[in-house]
Amino acid sequence: MQAFDIWHKLHLRGSKVICSLFLLVLGSGFAAAQYRSTPYPHNLPNYDDKLLHYGFLLGLNQSGFRMVQSQEFVNAQSDTIQSVYPQSGLGFSLGFIVNLRWRDQLDLRLLPTVSFYERRIRFNLKGEEDPLDAIFEASVVQFPLLLKYKSMRRGDHRFYVVGGLAPSVQVGRKKEKGVSDENQLVTQRFDLTLETGIGMDIYFPFFKFAPELRFSYGLVNVFDKEDKFLSRNIDRLSTYTVTVLFLFE
């Protein structure tokens, strides 16, 4: 339990860092926008009238697994494994933006993205002081398809919310560190996540910038259970990610 409490505190700390970074950027943009108190736009006044526009994004993410332990582990309380739980790790994302104007305040967005994730599962072994970490480092190509609902524009800024689905495929993964070949945990290459987020568009003379906080929740079980020493303790794994994005359009 002590190890779990330490992990939980570290996870919350990492999430707070990402959220604090988003709030810092959002607050700076809001302060800059408020500097011009007029409700009328100064920059790119007709930008949102375009049917299509494009851009790119950069992001910092914290990602991990949501895990369900197997009934075998719960019933037997494994002779050798005392506890097993996931840990999150930091990564980054980069991608492109294709935005289709659907209504005055509603856009349809496709954001093909390449993300680099680090996720961990920690096994505490009975009689061993050092835990066993299975570390998943993967490169993932994602295709989020999102609806973006925007507030009315006031001056050179407007708030928005986004939501949608993101199918993804894993195109590269490093071998698990600290785990022998016969105990490698196997995850599926394909995933589907529910995406939700909030952000603010800030209009500059030559481009639009938007800090965005995005939450991703895996909808499918990505764990391929095999009859191995470590695998028998896990029944289900689904992904979750918190990302701070910086979008330039």
Image (cartoon, rainbow, N blue to C red):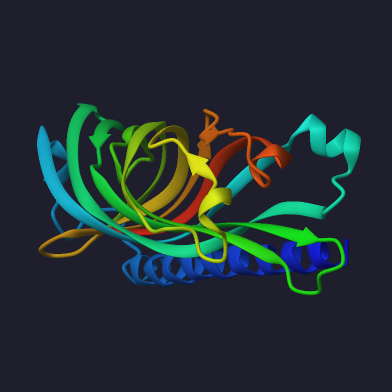
- Image coords of residue 135 (percent x, y): 53, 60
Residue at 19 percent across and 31 percent down: it is 101
Q: Which residue shows up at 46% across the image and 34% down it?
A: 193
When the figure is inspected, residue 120 is found, relative to residue 149, above or below; the finding is below
Q: Is residue 124 left or right of residue 87?
A: right
Q: From the top left corner, tell me how far across and down residue 218 is, in percent.
A: 52, 35
Residue in view at x 81 percent, y 54 percent: 83
Quadrant assignment, res 53: top left
The image shows residue 43 at horizontal and vertical percentages of 16, 60
Q: Is residue 100 left or right of residue 242?
A: left
Residue 248 appears in the rendering: no
Q: Quadrant of residue 165?
A: top left
Q: How many marks can you see?
A: 0
Regarding residue 21, the answer to whether it shows in the image is yes
**63 or 158: nearer the eye?**
63
Looking at the image, residue 154 lies above or below residue 239: below
**Front-most of residues 167 and 204:** 167
Residue 168 in picture, x, y percent from top left? 34, 37
Q: Which residue appears farthest toward the top when viewing the image? A: 102
**Image quadrant containing the N terminus:** bottom right
Of residues 150 and 178, which is closer to you in this image? 178
Left-right relation of 93 to 226: left
Residue 35 falls in image quadrant = bottom left
Nearest to the observer: residue 110 or residue 132: 132
